[in-house]
């Protein structure tokens, strides 16, 4: 049953009230919102249930007795009916973390600052996402002023945002020597990092990045080539090859339209873009692979430096590299990094 007192999802048909409310499926039989309706629903009623937001029904339970709520939830009576609400045990959580007396802000694994541990736990519960404490205190912009908890290191992700992560001490199944020597099977797992080094596997690359304290994007799959070009490397489906600014080395990137880009009436992407420095810019935005909009004039991203894409204006098919070049700062696109922070152990 939803907030309007209507049932909007069909769990079972051809069942009595007892069969519906006492089903063997504990995933919904013990839920506070499970309800039943008198008589069998007609096909038109099922249709309206999905289209118009539900059909009339009655709750199976009128009290919290026997109701089992999810993690960090408890059953309460609201407006005369039982309801599972988020109610995390903040004190117990702080005790497990060894921060019994910490009452200040915390930095979440999503890179956002929360006023308290409870705020973070409640958001995790309400949004139904796995949100954890990265470190205590407000979120920082660099590792220089960040003290990580015991056994954790500070690592900058693809957007230069610091995170406290566990650097795994376990050995990877392969070694870097296997990749360079070309043993059978090693070439398939090997990857070329943007630092120009060959790693025997993604596991080796992640460990190296963790030890270095800085994310290492994957340039392309396979061992690094001395004179690689966009014509000599093969990118995965959905990826494009761009050149590093300065070194002009090729890198396979995934250009995707950020979810937070707004569309104007003419379907051009406009609105502010969040930069790696925490500021916003509205100069560029992606529309499709390697395409951007600059003052409503189509342009093409033709170079890629370590953190920012650089785009030039395109007139009559000719790319002008030196005129009105702007930097494109995107924090939600994996254009700048082949591997995200969630590839590391939290």
Image (cartoon, rainbow, N blue to C red):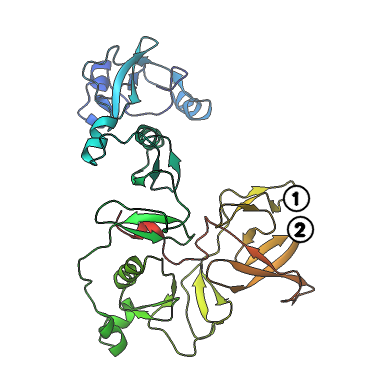
Above/below status of 323 relative to 149: below
Distance Cα–Cα, label 1 vs label 2 = 10 Å
Above-or-below relation of 254 to 16: below
Q: Circle 1: is it few (<14), some (14-19), or many (20+) Cα within 10 Å?
A: few
Q: Dot 2 lies on which element?
A: loop
Residue depicted at 64% across the width and 65% down the height: 327
Q: In which quarter of the image is residue 12?
A: top left
Q: How many labels does the image show?
A: 2
Left or right of 91, for residue 285: right
Q: Nearer the viewer, mark 1 or mark 2?
A: 2
Q: Position of residue 260 (x, y in %)?
A: 58, 48
Label 2 crowd (10 A; few <14 / some 14-19 / many >=20): few
Is 230 left, or right, of 266 in this rendering? left
Q: Quadrant of residue 124?
A: top left
Secondary structure at numbered mark 1: loop
Please identify the quarter of the rendering in which residue 137 is found: top left
Residue 162 vs residue 37, the one in the foreground: 162
In this view, which residue lies farthest toward the right? Answer: 316
Q: Are marks 1 and 2 in contact (CB under 8 Å)?
A: yes
Residue lying furthest top: 80
Question: What residue is drawn where x is 21% and y is 39%?
Answer: 96
Q: Could you tell me which residue is drawn at 25 percent across and 53 percent down?
A: 150
Residue 89 percent across, percent down from the top left:
27, 29
Please tell me which of labels 1 and 2 falls first in the chain.
Answer: 1
| Direction from residue 154 to residue 66 in the image, left or right | left
- Quarter of the N terminus within the rendering: top left
Which residue bears the numbered disc 1? 266
**Residue designated by label 2:** 296
Q: Which residue corresponds to the image point at 19% horizontal and 28% vertical from the top-left? A: 24
């Amino acid at each position: 049953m939803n907030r309007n007192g209507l049932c909007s999802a069909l769990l079972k048909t051809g069942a009595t009230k007892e069969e519906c409310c006492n089903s063997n499926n504990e995933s919904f039989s013990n839920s506070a919102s499970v309800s039943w309706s008198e008589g069998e629903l007609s096909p038109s009623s099922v249709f309206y249930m999905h289209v118009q937001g539900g059909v009339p029904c009655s709750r199976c339970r009128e009290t919290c007795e026997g109701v089992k709520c999810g993690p960090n939830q408890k059953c309460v009576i609201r407006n005369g009916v039982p309801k599972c609400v988020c109610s995390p045990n903040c004190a117990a959580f702080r005790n497990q973390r060894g921060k019994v007396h910490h009452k200040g802000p915390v930095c979440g694994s999503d890179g956002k600052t929360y006023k308290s541990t409870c705020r973070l736990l409640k958001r995790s519960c309400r949004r139904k996402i796995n949100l954890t404490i990265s470190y205590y205190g407000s979120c920082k912009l660099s590792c220089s002023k960040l003290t990580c908890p015991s056994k954790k290191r500070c690592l900058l992700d693809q957007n230069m945002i610091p995170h406290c992560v566990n650097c795994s001490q376990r050995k990877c199944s392969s070694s870097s020597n296997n990749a360079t020597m070309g043993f059978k099977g090693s070439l398939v797992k090997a990857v070329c990092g943007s630092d120009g080094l060959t790693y025997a596997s993604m596991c080796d690359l992640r460990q190296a990045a963790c030890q270095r304290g800085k994310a290492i994007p994957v340039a392309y799959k396979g061992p690094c080539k001395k004179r690689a070009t966009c014509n000599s490397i093969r990118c995965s489906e959905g990826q494009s090859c761009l050149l590093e600014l300065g070194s002009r080395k090729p890198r396979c990137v995934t250009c995707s339209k950020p979810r937070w880009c707004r569309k104007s009436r003419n379907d051009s992407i406009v609105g502010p873009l969040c930069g790696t420095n925490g500021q916003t810019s509205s100069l560029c935005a992606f529309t499709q692979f390697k395409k951007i909009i600059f003052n409503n004039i189509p342009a093409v991203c033709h170079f890629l430096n370590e953190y920012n894409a650089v785009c030039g204006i395109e007139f009559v098919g000719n790319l002008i590299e030196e005129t009105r070049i702007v930097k494109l700062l995107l924090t939600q696109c994996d254009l700048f990094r082949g591997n995200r922070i969630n590839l590391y152990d939290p």
